[in-house]
Image (tube, helix red, strand yellow):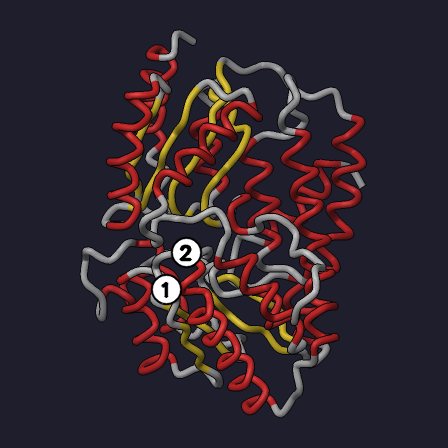
Amino acid sequence: MSKNEILGIMHSAIQKPRNAYLDEWMGEGRRVMGYYCSYVPEEIFTAAGLLPYRLRGAGSDSSADGDAYMSARICTFVRHTVSLALRGELDFLDGVVLAQNCDHIRRAADLFRKKVRPAFYGFLSIPRVPKERLFDWYLAELRRLKAEMEAHYSIAITEQNLEDAIALHNATRQRIARLYELRKREAPPITGQEALTVTVAAHVMPRAQFNSLMDHLLADLEQARGNGDYRARVIVTGGVMDEPEYLAAIENQGALSVAELVCFGQRSFGDPIGSRPGEPLERIARQRFFQVPCARMVECFDEQFSELTRRMKEYKADGIIFQRMKFCDPWAGDGHNLYWRMKEAGIPFLSLEREYQVSAAGQVKTRVQAFMEQMGK
């Protein structure tokens, strides 16, 4: 299959809550587990025989159902996902596992438990400081979740099940890493819009089928000439972003996104889980807890900044575009800190505030054009 054919399949898979791969999975009598954030490890669900399904608002044309229960100062990403659930459009889920990722998702968790009432409801208390002294807390939470799932579904999640799940998800991580490696080329064979389509699809498809599609895509891309028709290379960072169309609005101004350090982007995968001695659940927990931290974590801003500047060198980026959902408090704080740190370092930096599923193409066009002029591009 060609690049365009594969991207077409993946684009189709992310347009609505359900897709053909999901329907086929459920048609075989298999279960699906919903979750919001990468601090909830997918491997546990895979080991239990469930399909990990990352919650999104795709296909929602109104947040009115969520608005009835949630403050107007809750971000529209959360309000759209809750609206889908309240309208019954996520009833195919056999359960959800949520956490206090932020105050907005914490409120969504209350509504899932009280109003949506999924067959299985799990909740994780995740520390906000990724330090060794708090790792046992996180690991204990995962052990409790595993026991609750085993009791509810009358299954045993064995160490071999977990090892197999690690191998499957590591295979995805390796393919995503290869995709990003190709984007370091002077003429990358794939745009940011297309790459985000790929990484979003990974979160709503069975991983074995996704990995197979990736093999075909990578084979095509490795032989492709690439496109050097851009004015500047940028890294897009910030919070949740699962709308490739928003990246397209940026790239249409000549700012090629060469890496997306965002939720649903590369940050959601991280490095492969190692095979060093130790129980598999602990290795899973360690990889997730000590991943590149996002804004929900504190006392680690220096690590986030260092990661961004390292990526800039690797991908030969000219500047950083930071985006966040309106009313997202954790990322507002990080955005403020990044602005001043980037200014001190002399790194071109653009901050964009947005709503979910609203392209704001005119505003983006104007801001990005001005940013390009600032960079002298």
Quarter of the image with the N terminus in it: top right
Residue 111 x/y as whole percent:
31, 75
Residue in the image at 36% along x and 24% along y: 365
Q: Secondary structure at mark 2?
A: loop
Front residue (pair 337, 326):
337
Residue 38 x/y as whole percent:
49, 58
Front residue (pair 257, 142):
142
Q: Residue 272, relative to residue 342: is it above or below?
A: below
Residue bearing mark 2? 130
The three-letter code of the residue at mark 2 reads Pro
Front residue (pair 364, 54):
54
| Label 2 crowd (10 A; few <14 / some 14-19 / many >=20) | many
Residue in the image at 50% along x and 71% along y: 139
Residue 134 x/y as whole percent:
40, 65
Whether residues under marks 2 and 1 lie with C-beta atoms below 8 angstroms apart, the answer is: yes
Q: Residue 282, relative to residue 222: is it above or below?
A: below
Residue bearing mark 1? 127
